[in-house]
Image (tube, helix red, strand yellow):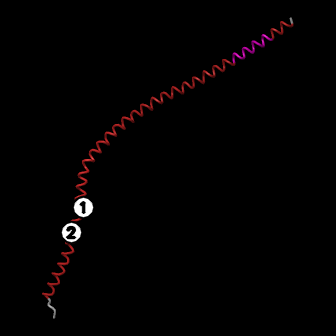
């Protein structure tokens, strides 16, 4: 009977060990499932964020296309203004030259005025 008790005690220890190992494996399995579920949740969130960012960038792409068309229109309009800018530059150059001529004429008129006054003074007040 002693052997039977030993066998029974070993079977009981074996059952406890098997039960402990089973609990350990179940706990590890539960932990791994939880980790995988957490990772899955993160991936789903990342996927949703990617979809949202893609929608935002699509809107930016549309905006960029609109801006490109607007810039092209501005370039074509500014091209037609170049002719007017060249005309304004030519007029400005002519005005500068005209101002120089007016300045020379002003000096000449001042010199003539001085001579006329000198002649007039000598005629009205002859030297003694």
Q: Is residue 78 above or below residue 13?
A: below
Q: Is residue 122 left or right of residue 12?
A: left
User: Local crowd at mark 2 within 10 Å, few (<14), some, or many (≥20)?
Assistant: few
- Look at the numbered disc 1 and give the secondary structure of its residue: helix
Q: Is residue 77 left or right of residue 19?
A: left
In front of the other: 86 or 66 = 86
Q: Quadrant of residue 88?
A: bottom left
Which residue of the protein is positioned furthest toward the bottom in this rendering? 128
Residue 30, percent across and down? 63, 20
**Which quadrant of the figure contains the C terminus?**
bottom left
Q: Mark 1 and mark 2 in contact? Answer it, CB < 8 Å.
A: no
**Which quadrant of the figure contains the N terminus?**
top right
Q: Is residue 20 left or right of residue 33?
A: right
Q: What is the magenta range?
A: 10-23
Residue 116, percent across and down? 15, 81
Q: Is residue 91 above or below residue 113?
A: above
> Which residue occupies 56% across, 26% down?
39
Residue 22, percent across and down? 69, 15
Residue that carries the numbered disc 2 in the rendered image: 101
Mark sitting on residue 117: none
- First-in-chain label (1 vs 2): 1
* Residue 17 highlighted magenta (yes or no): yes
> Which residue occupies 23% across, 68% down?
100
Residue that carries the numbered disc 1 in the rendered image: 93
> Which residue occupies 60% across, 21% down?
33
Residue 71, percent across and down? 32, 43
Q: Quadrant of residue 76?
A: top left
């Amino acid at each position: 009977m002693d052997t039977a008790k030993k066998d029974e005690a070993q079977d009981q220890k074996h059952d406890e060990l098997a039960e402990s190992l089973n609990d350990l494996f179940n706990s590890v399995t539960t932990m791994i499932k939880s980790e995988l579920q957490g990772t899955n949740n993160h991936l789903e969130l990342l996927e949703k964020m990617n979809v949202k960012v893609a929608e935002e960038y699509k809107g930016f792409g549309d905006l960029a296309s609109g801006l490109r068309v607007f810039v092209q229109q501005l370039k074509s309009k500014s091209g037609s203004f170049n002719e007017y800018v060249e005309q304004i530059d030519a007029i400005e150059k002519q005005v500068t030259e005209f101002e120089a001529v007016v300045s020379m004429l002003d000096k000449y008129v001042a010199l003539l005025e001085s001579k006329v006054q000198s002649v007039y003074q000598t005629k009205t007040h002859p030297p003694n």
